[in-house]
Amino acid sequence: MSRVMARHYASLAVPRYTSYPTAADFSPQVGKDQYQTWLRRLRQSEPVSLYLHVPYCRDLCHYCGCHAKIARRETVIEAYAETLIREIRQAGSCLTERPEAVHLHWGGGTPSILGGNGIVRVTNVLQEYYDFSPVMEHAIELDPRTVTQALCDDLARVGVNRVSLGVQDFNADVQRAIGRVQPIIQVEAAVAALEQAGITRLNFDLIYGLPLQTVETLRETCERVAELRPSRIACYGYAHLPARRANQRLIDTSLLPDADARYEQSQIVGETFMAMGYEPVGIDHYALPDDALVIAAKSGQLRRNFQGYTNDDCPTLLGFGASSISQFKEGYTQNIADIGQYKTSVHEERAPVIRGYAFNDSDMLRGLIIEKLMCDFRVDLNEVASGANFSDELALLRPLVADGIVTIHSGIIAMVPEHFALVRVVAAVFDEFRRESAHSFSMAI
């Protein structure tokens, strides 16, 4: 495939497909009543995953695309923790049985802003309604600049056994351009404190496509990250959407790499980590050979949800906190993103759900096809969609076949290995909702 053609595909705006349908396709027609009905249907025999969203940070980084706000007063944070607890109790009152929780993930924002005591309090309330599995993965996202030994000790006591550190990039010029100055010594200190507390399963999150980032600086960052030997590394392409995120308007767009440079950066990330002993998982994750994510990928058990690639196979994920999303067997629901309105709803004893989506048979089938492509880079339509008619989609794939991106043989759609990074473009062919609003999504690479 020519460089011009590669640039064309890499610059297409397509969803990340951490869900299908995507959150952009949710509707207010599915709300709190449906949410509570789906909660009541949960059974003790069906394990669940839990997600807690804490939307506050001490400072907001320029690149951040999350639902997050600055909070410096402790009263604001304490009030949010109280609201989170009330929401958990309200949802718990809808349960007719006591499900087992096998995954618990804290995201943000900066969840540790709640402090050790706040995290303990919220966790204790969760245990009033859910049985924590003895082998539960309890994960939290941390900003290395805020990690202390006391915090790590508190996290270990509450059962946290996996931590994701937001590293982004080690280059000083890039850090200044994105408003997140974080010398490598701070990351090394955070790793040491976590290991001292007995938390050794570490993830590092990186971003490519940042202002002033080059192939050379990114390679150096990747090499220094690999030397610290986290068990997992995720490296995402920066999605510059200033119309949706005011803080991103602080980034000088003239300093952003173009589509060619982004493609080269994505390639160097994979080359560097694989050369240093990591194995690729999906399009943006890397892990050590003995990690559960690698094992899941090799056995065909890799999954994809709102946290990205995972070995979590629970059909139900219950989200708590402003903007959080819940996934049920029957569909999705999402909480109010505005923190003030979220608090008002909870304190008025109303489920803070504002929109969602109820699956039909076509959604579930297309969602399975998209997930197979995103996780395995191939899907056998004869196996997962026997009898279904996808002639229109197969016709749309012909140009990608001609360009050497994908192959189709006897109903099996398979990505050509050197173009795995373009799998979102192939997955989008099966997305019935993708229309003119494609501009609201990030570039394919």
Image: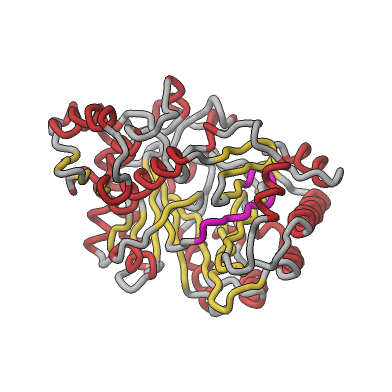
Horizontal arrangement in the rendering, residue 249 relative to residue 310 (left or right): right
Residue at horizontal 42 percent and vertical 33 percent from the top:
442
Quadrant hosting residue 16: top left
Residue at horizontal 80 percent and vertical 41 percent from the top:
345
In the rendered image, the quadrant that contains the N terminus is top left
Residue 189 point in image, percent of width and height: 52, 68
Q: Is residue 149 visible?
A: no
Residue 402 point in image, percent of width and height: 13, 31
Name above or below for residue 185 compared with residue 320: below
Horizontal arrangement in the rendering, residue 78 relative to residue 220 (left or right): right
Residue at horizontal 42 percent and vertical 36 percent from the top:
15
Residue 205 point in image, percent of width and height: 45, 55
Quadrant hosting residue 161: bottom right
The residue segment tinted magenta is 314-324
Give the residue furthest to the front: 387
Which of 9/347 is in front? 347
In the rendered image, the quadrant that contains the C terminus is top left
Name above or below for residue 404 compared with residue 396: below
Horizontal arrangement in the rendering, residue 294 relative to residue 95 (left or right): left
Name above or below for residue 284 compared with residue 153: above
Residue at horizontal 49 percent and vertical 30 percent from the top:
241
The magenta stretch spans residue 115: no
Name above or below for residue 390 compared with residue 94: above
Q: Is residue 62 visible?
A: yes
Residue 11 point in image, percent of width and height: 31, 29
